[in-house]
Image (spheres, rainbow, N blue to C red):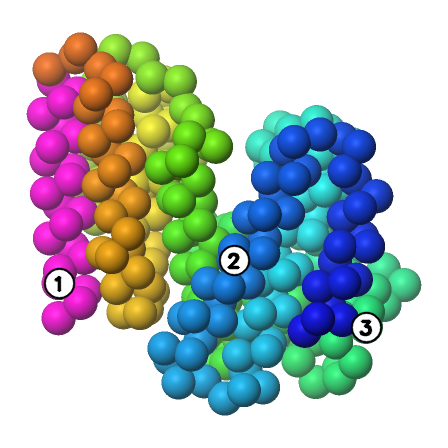
């Protein structure tokens, strides 16, 4: 793993000149590696499977660095799908071999990276690939929620309530489809909706311990003078907390 991290550092050093967003993404990646290990251990995976989970965590955002260099944004809809781009990078000149010599996990690693940012995982993945894909999605979302609590990821707030479609989506315990977003306030719902795409009980334990979503919602409430929005946020918070408790039972 030390060799893999060293290669990752060698790769990302080429992008440090492009500023603090690159550094943020590097730190995010290394925290995701730790989260992958933590979740994998709680799932009682083998040492080899824990290692694969960590490699997937290390490489899940490998496409982000060239994305920022070329497009100066991490918004996939305005540039390129960073997960698909990452898979291309790892396949080019067999670059994946720099991180893992054994080829038997290649499809699992590449598929997990490809689907870590998609709205949902395809139904036809084999059981083991599906497991790793869910694991990286959990770890990635947990750390993104952490970044919202620290202020490193920011969203502008408009003093308008969520549109009814977005509001009902959250109350119905579903993820937000970015195609439904209409206002800056609606965009605030995206990270909250992450909770409804968390897969493992071990991940819910982490979210309950950290209270990331509750902190995010409380921060939103403090920023608005819109009483309707405050009421929506309180109802959403209750829905989220109840959902976590049910998943932990």
* Magenta residues, start to end: 228-249
Does 25 sit above or below residue 221?
below
Point out which mark residue 76 bears.
Answer: none
Spot occupied by residue 118 in the image (x, y as percentages of width and height): 50, 51
Q: How many marks?
A: 3
Identify the element where label 1 is drawn.
helix
Point out which mark residue 97 bears.
Answer: 3
Which SS does the magenta portion mostly show?
helix
Task: Tell me if I can see residue 81 in this picture.
Answer: no
Residue drawn where x is 31% and y is 69% of the image: 202
Point out which mark residue 32 bears.
Answer: 2
Q: How far is mark 3 from mark 2, CA to CA?
A: 21 Å
Spot occupied by residue 158 in the image (x, y as percentages of width and height): 31, 13
**Label 1 vs 3, first from the N-terminus:** 3
Does 126 sit above or below residue 210?
below
Does 247 sit above or below residue 228?
below
**Label 3 vs 2, first from the N-terminus:** 2
């Amino acid at each position: 793993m030390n060799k893999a991290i060293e290669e990752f550092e060698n790769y990302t050093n080429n992008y440090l000149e492009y500023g603090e967003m690159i550094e943020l993404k590097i730190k995010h990646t290394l925290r995701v590696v730790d989260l992958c290990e933590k979740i994998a251990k709680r799932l009682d995976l083998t040492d080899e499977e824990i290692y694969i989970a960590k490699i997937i965590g290390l490489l899940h955002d490998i496409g982000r660095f060239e994305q920022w260099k070329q497009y100066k944004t991490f918004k996939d809809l305005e540039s390129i799908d960073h997960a698909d781009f990452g898979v291309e990078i790892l396949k080019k000149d067999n670059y994946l071999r720099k991180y893992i010599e054994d080829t038997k996990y290649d499809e699992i690693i590449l598929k997990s990276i490809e689907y870590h940012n998609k709205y949902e995982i395809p139904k036809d993945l084999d059981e083991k690939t599906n497991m790793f894909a869910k694991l990286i999605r959990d770890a990635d979302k947990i750390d993104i929620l952490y970044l919202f609590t620290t202020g490193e990821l920011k969203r502008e707030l408009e003093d308008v309530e969520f549109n009814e479609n977005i509001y009902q989506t959250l109350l119905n315990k579903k993820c937000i489809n970015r195609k439904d977003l209409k206002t800056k306030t609606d965009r605030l719902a995206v990270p909250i909706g992450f909770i409804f795409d968390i897969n493992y009980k071990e991940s819910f334990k982490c979210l309950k311990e950290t209270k990331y979503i509750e902190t995010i919602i409380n921060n939103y409430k403090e920023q608005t003078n819109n009483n309707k929005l405050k009421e929506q946020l309180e109802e959403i918070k209750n829905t989220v907390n109840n959902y976590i408790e049910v998943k932990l039972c």
